[in-house]
Structure formats: C-alpha cells, structure tokens
Amino acid sequence: MAATTQPQTGAKPATSLSNEEILRYSRHLIMPEVGMEGQLKLKNAKVLLIGTGGLGAPLGLYLAAAGVGRLGLVDFDVVDFTNLQRQVTFGSDDVGKPKTEAARARLSNLNPDIQIDTFETKLTSDNALEVFKDFDVIVDGTDNFPTRYLVNDASVLLGKPNVYGSIFRFEGQATVFGMPEGPCYRCLYPEPPPPGLVPSCAEGGVLGVLPGIVGSIQAMETIKLILGAGENLVGRLLLFDALGMKFRELKLRKNPNCPMCGEHRTIHKLIDYYEFCGVRGEEAPGPDVQVPEITPRELKARLDRGDDLFILDVREPHEFQICNLNGHLIPLGELPRRVHELDSSREIVAHCRSGKRSAEAVDFLRKAGFRKILNLRGGILAWSDDVDSRVPKY
Amino acid sequence: MSVKVMIPTPLRAYAGKRDSAEFSAATVGEALSGLTSQFRELRKHLYTEDGKLRAFVNVYLNDEDIRYLAKENTPTKDGDTISIIPSIAGGSFAR
C-alpha cells in the first residue's frame, strides 16, 4: 500500500497512486475522462517549461496542481519588481531572486509530490537538445523571437510536441506545434520580423492577466496531450482578443516545403538564432542608430547655467502623465507631420523613456536638416537615476 | 465585394489606431492594396521593397491561410474577413 510519492527518475514509470495522492487528485479521479489511468499518465509525464514569466506562471501552477510528475523550469532571469504585475508565481519577497528558485519554492509548496528540475541558464543552440531530451512535452512560454525558433527547431528535431502561446498587449495566440502530422512554428512564420518592429512588453505594455489566460490555455492543452483527451490545437491557431472578449480560430497547415518539418528537411541542426533574427551581439539595450548624445547630468548642468535648450519629448501622452521634464510633447509617430512645430535654429534635446525612440527622432530630424539636436542618453529613466530620483520610473 | 480587413494590434499604430477597415475588393490583393493606400505607413511593415508580402506576416481569408489558396489573387466575397497575423513573441524583445 505504501506506494511512492516521488516519481522515479529515468527507470520504471509509476504504476500506482498513494492514498494521499488519491485524495489530493480526487476531483480528477472522479471524472471518467481522467480516472486513475489518466492521473497516472500525469504522474509519469515530464514537461519542460521554457520561461517562468508571465506565461510560465499559470503554466507552472496548474501543471504542478494537476500532478505532472516531473516539471522542468528553464529561465536565467531574476525576479524584477515590474514582474509582479503579472508573474503570479512570485511574491514581493522574491524580488532579486532567480526566477527558477522562486518558482521552485512556490510550486513545491503547492505540490510537494512532484519533481521539479531547474535550469537557471539561457537556452542556446549548444544546450537545448541536451536540456530537452528527457522531457515528453515542451511548453514555450518565452518572450523573444530567437528563442521561439530555437525551441521549435529543437522540439521538431527531437520529435516532441511544443505547446505554444504568445501575447501582445491585449491579444494572445495559442497552438500546438511539433506533432508529426502537424505544422511547426516555421510553417507559420518562416522568417522572424526585423528587430525593433514588434515592441516588447516594456515598450508596448501588457495587461497582466492576459498571459494568465493564454498560459492557462497552454496548461490545458498540455494536460489534454498527456491524457489523450479532447481535441487539441494541432493545426489550429487560437486567437484571443481580450478587449473584445473574442476567440477566433485560424487553420494552421503543415507547410510541405517547410525547411524544418516538411517532406524535404533542410535544417538538420540548431543554428545561430540571434543572427537569424538579426539581433547579433546586443546585450544591453542601446539606440539602434548612432546619434549625438547628451547625458542627464550634462543636460542638468546646462539647464542650471541658463542655456536656452528646447526639450522635445517623443513619448505618448499617457506616459507624459506619469512623469515628464516639461518638454514639448510630440509622440514619435507624429513627428513627421508635426516637424514644423520645431525651430531648427534652437538647440533641441530629444528624450523618451529609455533613449531608443528619441534616438530615432534625432536621426529623423538630422536627416531632415536639423543640426543642433541631441539625444538624451538613457531617457527619463536615466534622468531619474542620475539627476532627480523624485521622478518616478516606469 | 465589401470585405473587412482586421488590423492586428502591433500594426494599429500605423493605421490610425483602427482595429479594422472595410474595402471594396474582388481579391485579397485588392483589399490589401486598399489598406496600404489608405494607410501608407503600413506598406513597409507588410511588404518588402520589391512588393512581396513579408514572410513574418500571414494573411488569412476567413480561416484559411492565403498561401494555401491563391495568395493575393484569392477572390473575395461580400462579408469576407481578411486577417493579418504578424508573429508576436510576447514579453521583452532583444532590441
């Protein structure tokens, strides 16, 4: 009667549930679609979560709660204060801790019976196949294009399903890639977008609960795959519009010419995904264009001296409401139309939140003939850090 | 033929913040032409310099990917919906 509460690693699959497990999962067991057989499948399942952030939070929580016997967590990041708006596995005490460590603590508290493996490492072409090999299902909860392609390719090469979810502001997508008869990520998107075209959460924002919904859908699909229940999202792209509260569905076809999963595969090993996505060698964020700059301290010194400087703020109106340097607000997208509001004989300092958008503005204005124009390096964030800490950061 | 083109969130900034627009068009290509004529800035996000639809943008007529239909020559009917689905990765983006 004393069955194991820990799943065996590597060796034989578990064949029974302890009395404690039976009680824990009773709400699963009383459903014929799950039953003892289904719960054992969950116990023997090995699921790897790539990313323990916005999508990873509900994923980890619900898969642990469901009794997935082995959960792998891959994330090299530490918990940041701004994560708490949506990454609900973490608490305020976790800020500064590695995410895998904080997630492990939370999930093993929720379910001490499961095995949690953590990989506090960046997933790369050098380690992906090794990390993936012991798991049955890969769940993509990542936040950047190079890793999406890496996860896809590694899953297809190893023949493992890849439960995909992604979000942007108020919209989400979910599907299951990597099944032998189904499409892979490259079938849908043979090419990544050029860097800078699709803003990040930090730049575009995201409603915190959105990854909660999409990640939960991913958890649901993962459990269904393990149980073999219901109809899964293979070949179906689920689109979720949170503002309209609408779900739509598009057909995803396997591309017969897909270089990865098609009839004539041409990709046989993992590549340099950062090069593929055009983001070579960018660790710290910096302006995409080289423009003349001024630091916040230099700007402050010049203003104190009484220099006649025109401050141009290229952020959006709602950002101006959060904090501002009393600049003249022309959102970047409107600059071409409103350039007549600027006097090219005056010295202009352009700023935004972090210095990227304003660098584009300076580049644009220089090409338009403005000669006396500088970019505030690091934006209003750097101003807050270096000049006036009363200015809130966001 | 009056067709509706759904504009995805990442591209709304270039389309006057609209989430959809209606055009009179007999093919998908015509509808997209209508879209990029009305919103010129969208053009470079959807098309390469030699006029091809960018590979990270998928276009659907109702629920079918036009790559598996007749691409931009796919005929449209009254009430059809064209969806533009760009890839989104969610989260931070290495920039």
Image (cartoon, coloured by chain):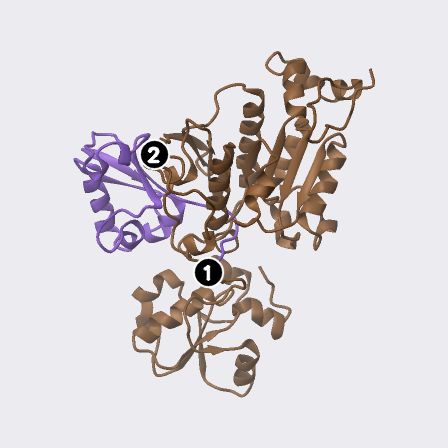
Chain colours: A brown, B purple
Frontmost residue, A207 versus A217 = A217
Residue A268 horizontal/vertical position (percent): 43, 42
Q: Chain of mark 2?
A: A
Q: SS of the residue at dot 2?
A: loop
Residue A64 horizontal/vertical position (percent): 68, 32
Mark 1 highlights which residue? Answer: A280
> Left or right of B73: which side holds A71?
right
Q: Residue at x 66, y 28 (%)?
A: A68
In the rendered image, the quadrant that contains the C terminus of chain A is bottom right
> Left or right of A132: which side holds A307?
left
Residue A51 horizontal/vertical position (percent): 59, 44
Q: Which mark is residue A255?
A: 2
CA distance for labels 1 and 2:
28 Å
Q: Residue at x 44, y 45 (%)?
A: B88
In the rendered image, the quadrant that contains the N terminus of chain A is top right
User: Closer to the N terminus: mark 1 or mark 2?
Assistant: 2
Q: Residue at x 63, y 52 (%)?
A: A77
In the figure, residue A13 lies in which quadrant? top right
